[in-house]
Amino acid sequence: MSGRLPERKHRILKAVVEEYIKDARQISSGELQSKYFSDISSATIRAELAALSDMGYLAQPHTSAGRLPTSKAYKYYVEHFVDRRPLRKQDVAMIDASFSAKFNAVEDIVKTTAKVISDVTNYTSVIVLKNVDSVVIREIKLVGLDGHSALVIIITDSGIIRDKVIKLNNVVDDEFITSATLMLNKIFSGCRVGELHLAEASVEKELKEFKELFDNVVAILETYCSVNDESVYMEGESKMLNYPDADMSSAKRFLSIIDNKSLIGALVDSAEDIEFSVKIGKDETAGMDKCAVITAKYKVNGREIGHAGVIGPERMDYSKVMSVLSYIGNALNNAIEGGEGEDDE
């Protein structure tokens, strides 16, 4: 953590950052004096602004213009001033409504989470799934749909459910469904998703008519645990371009980076063991100039299932973003646990 500035510089820097977050407009010493510091002369404020500029906290693009915050200023602001605040009633209502449905597939939950984060914050959102290969399979259920297709439902110890319709050459009747369900659970129940190769020997001992079904289930699980771009979900990629301080150069860089999901996934998938990770400025955000990334870890039943991140301008509303990520983390946990309970009934 950076050391605290002297009190007057501390207060002036806070005012400059909050004014810029609010309006994306440089503020002059005269405006600061009239709005915040009637007890300090304009000349003294100018001197403090100049000192903060020399220290790297403020920039003055034009001699006659006011000052604007640098990445260093935003980092100081997040460290010393940002705290979560209660969400607006309409934001809470939107989040609660989004998670009120029953989810049967992890993709549905993740896409909903990414969309609601982007909608409520009005920034770009990223969800990165992780630790999927350590998830333990609790149960596999089969639902016959017609003569040659079935719905496969996979329930894990994290409460995350994966479902997919598969086509089979075998006739899918009630007898097949009953026998196949017993066989699949005998093989897979208690198996970690990342240890699927250990189940292959078991299937050879079972009836060969189930081999095709086994191969389909393995394919579903391998897709589920593969670490690739499918593990990264994004919403609101174009929202960064709507902010008044976005310029063509930084916009091009932003678009080129978010198009690389592996890079974005690594940026959001922070290894730090903290509730929130805040990265500000191009040196910390893979070269995205004038951008900030806030990341939160999400857990279900105590197991870390991934990270949710928000990418926005440096002048983003940090307090609101942290509040949204925190509230959605609880809503996500409740949605997954609720989905698991309903399916088990």
Image: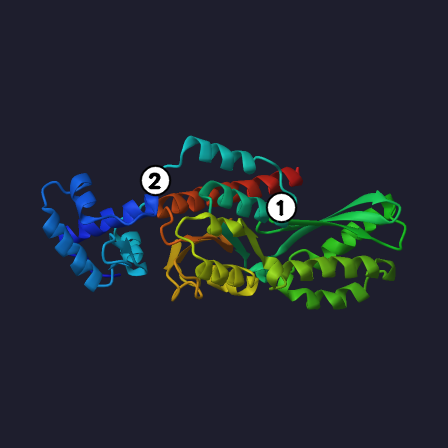
Q: Earlier in the sequence, mark 2 or mark 1?
A: 2
Q: Secondary structure at mark 1?
A: helix
For the residue pair 296 and 210, the one nearer the viewer reads as: 296
Residue 29, image x, y percentages: 18, 48
> Hey, what amino acid is under mark 2?
Arg
> Hey, what amino acid is under mark 1?
Asp
Classify 77 as above or below 332: below
Which residue is drawn at the image coordinates 46% and 34% (left, top)? 92
Q: Quadrant of the C terminus?
A: top right
Answer with left or right where residue 240 lies relative to residue 81: right
Which disc number belongs to residue 108?
Answer: 1
Crowd band around label 1 with a 10 angstrom C-alpha radius: few (<14), some (14–19), many (20+): few
For the residue pair 163 and 248, the one nearer the viewer reads as: 248
Classify 283 as above or below 345: below
Classify 321 as above or below 256: above
Q: Mark 2 to mark 1: distance in Å?
A: 28 Å
Which disc number belongs to residue 26?
Answer: none
Which disc number belongs to residue 85?
Answer: 2
Answer with left or right where residue 46 lies relative to residue 322: left
Determine the image quadrant of residue 48. bottom left
Determine the image quadrant of residue 84. top left
For the residue pair 179 and 304, the one nearer the viewer reads as: 304
Q: Is residue 82 visible in this depiction of the protein?
A: no
Answer with left or right where residue 93 lies relative to residue 50: right
Q: Is residue 291 visible in this depiction of the protein?
A: yes
The extreme front residue here reads: 64
Residue 286, image x, y percentages: 45, 66
